[in-house]
């Protein structure tokens, strides 16, 4: 993988996700630098998967991830209080239903 700029001396940054059990979600484990995807997988195995059971490892170039910023929190995650139909308070739970 090419370096991000001619003055950059580090390999690309990769985000590592681990799956501990079959069918479980992949959970972010951390980040590491690697020259390519194969090296990122091998390094992720050595760094993040040596202490516990792991079924699967995903690595993703950090530059390919788009995320919200803390400045977005107020407006982006507004729960839209004006849309009352989104709240389950208008529904009656039938007798005998548990765990709701």
Image: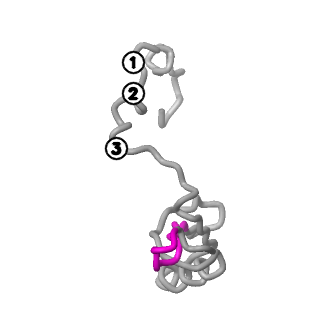
Q: Which mark is residue 54?
A: none
Considering only vertical position in the picture, is 24 above or below 3? above
Q: Name the residue under label 3.
A: 70
Element type where label 1 sits in the image: loop
State if disc 1 and disc 2 touch (CB < 8 Å). yes
**Crowd tier of the residue under label 3, counting other residues whose Cα lies within 10 Å: few below 14, some 14–19, many 20 or above:** few
State if disc 2 and disc 3 touch (CB < 8 Å). no
Indicate the colouring scheme: one colour
| Among the two numbered marks 3 and 1 on one chain, the one whose residue lies closer to the N terminus | 3
Q: Image quadrant of residue 30?
A: bottom left
Magenta stretch contains residue 49: no
Q: Which residue is drawn at 50% across and 70% down?
A: 13
Residue 41 in picture, x, y percent from top left: 61, 78
Magenta stretch contains residue 15: yes
Residue 91 in picture, x, y percent from top left: 50, 16
CA gap, disc 3 and disc 2:
13 Å
Element type where label 2 sits in the image: loop
Q: Which mark is residue 81?
A: 1
Please give the range of residues in magenta. Answer: 5-17
């Amino acid at each position: 993988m090419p370096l991000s700029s001619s003055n950059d001396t580090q390999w690309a940054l990769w985000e590592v996700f681990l799956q501990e059990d079959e069918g479980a979600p992949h959970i972010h484990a951390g980040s590491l630098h690697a020259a390519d995807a194969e090296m990122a997988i091998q390094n992720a195995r050595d760094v993040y998967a040596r202490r516990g059971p792991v079924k699967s490892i995903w690595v993703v170039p950090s530059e390919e991830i788009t995320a919200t910023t803390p400045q977005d929190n107020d407006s982006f995650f507004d729960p839209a209080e004006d849309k009352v139909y989104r709240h389950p308070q208008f529904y009656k739970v039938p007798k005998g239903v548990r765990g709701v």
